[in-house]
Amino acid sequence: TLVSSLEKKIDDTEKKYDETNKISEERLKKAMDAESKIDDLNMAMLRLQEKISNMETDEKVQRQALLSTPVRSMSEHLSIPIVPKNLENGYHEAEEPKEPQSAPPALKDYGNGDPKLKKSSAEKQQENVDALIDCVAKNLGYCEGKPVAAFTIYKCLLHWKSFEAEKTSVFDRLIQLIGSAIENEEDNDNLAYWLSNTSSLLFLLQRSLKAAGAPGTVSRKKPPQPTSLFGRMAQGLRSASFANMHVEATDVVRQVEAKYPALLFKQQLTAYVEKIYGIIRDNIKKELSSLISLCIQAPRTMKASMLRISGRSSGQTQSNHWQKIIENLDILLKILQDNHVPPVLAQKIFTQIFSYINVQLFNSLLLRRECCSFSNGEYVKAGLAELELWCAKATSEYAASSWDEIRHIRQAV
């Protein structure tokens, strides 16, 4: 009787323990879900603060422009016109001669007395701008992993005091150059070159420019990028993964009080970084879309039993499609590495590509019920294993959380 009562108590205790353990696991899960929701809310709040800050900055710039710049002058800067030959550093010859704002100080002082000297200094400055445009239009390559063109443009603009100029044509010329350079949207190598240069130049401007009339705080404390992705990109450029650029920038960057044309140039440059980034990402998506549709279902001519018997031939057919996907990813990774594209941008590109693969495969399973078979599950699982190996080979510097982006199709498989 005593043994029976003790056994009963032990059973009751074990049941209570199991119940308590289950409750504690549920509470732990709820706590983790709550923590995840808090993180999401924090990110949403940061993005909202970022957008509000952007709106305030843009409003301040526009208000300042309305107060200090004539309407005709603003319309010139808001458009990206082809600079006419009679436009010298932002001035028409028909206008009353004024000293060019972006000319070096020595030329300004030297040309104060004689109008001919003023004109010659403006012509000299125009020649300098032409020389810069001709220079950076070519592929200048990289020095110690840093894009030569971006640093050349920045140092010239700094030397000419173009950032502090009320009127200058150099920014419009540079924007036209970038626009014409990326007209061929199929050339990923060229696009990656300009993505590297524009993002590096944007990083330098981010650390250098501060709005006119602002206190001595550095403008980079405010996130000026118009989207959350490129707001985070600016933070990524200041991270350890971009330490070499950071050290170099410390020697090169000088704080300047930027006028309206320089701030507008930074906004236009940001738009081009976003555009080039999107073109590269969409190009690789187009290349993968036809391959993904072939990776969802085992060949219909082979039955499940035949798949087990002739596993080699079917595996080879399957691996061909997945191998092409891996080859496309390898080509893109090499292009980004050769052009020294900041890792934070490369991570975003691959993360979005893997998210695209996840969505396409997962939706195919949902829409095509015949695909939900054991043989198809093995078929896709083998291909996903190759993607996992690719992520390991690419390292977290470039692959980042790409593998996590295909968690839904992994679970479905």
Image (cartoon, helix red, strand yellow):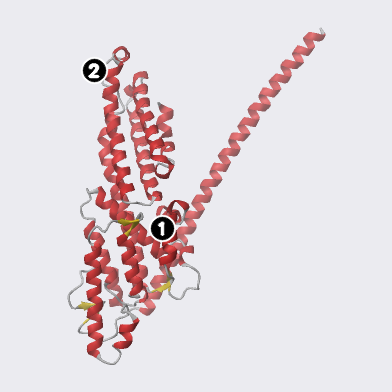
Q: Residue at x 75, y 13 (%)?
A: 8
Name the spot of residue 94 as percent of width and height, x first: 20, 84
Q: Is residue 299 left or right of residue 51?
A: left
Residue 255 appears in the picture as rendered: yes
Q: Which element carries disc 1, helix, strand or loop?
A: helix
For this orientation, the residue located farthest to the right is 2
Q: Nearer the viewer, mark 2 or mark 1?
A: 1
* Kind of residue at badge 2: Thr
For this orientation, the residue located farthest to the left is 85
Q: Which element carries disc 2, helix, strand or loop?
A: loop
Q: Which residue is mark 1?
A: 245
Q: Is residue 146 above or below residue 347?
A: below
Q: Residue at x 39, y 44 (%)?
A: 398
Name the spot of residue 169 as percent of width and height, x first: 26, 73
For this orientation, the residue located farthest to the bottom is 113
Question: Which of these two is toward me, 398 or 304?
Answer: 398
Displayed quadrant of residue 101: bottom left
* Kind of residue at badge 1: Met
Crowding around mark 1 (Cα neighbors within 10 Å: few <14, some 14 to 19, many 20+) is many
Q: Is residue 400 above or below residue 246?
A: above
Numbered label attached to residue 229: none
Question: Which of these two is toward me, 58 or 183?
Answer: 183
Displayed quadrant of residue 306: top left
Residue 96 appears in the picture as rendered: no
Displayed quadrant of residue 307: top left
Sequence-first disc among 2 and 1: 1
The CA distance from mark 2 to mark 1 is 55 Å
Question: Which of these two is toward me, 85 or 30?
Answer: 85
Numbered label attached to residue 301: 2
Name the spot of residue 82 as percent of width and height, x first: 20, 69
Crowding around mark 2 (Cα neighbors within 10 Å: few <14, some 14 to 19, many 20+) is few
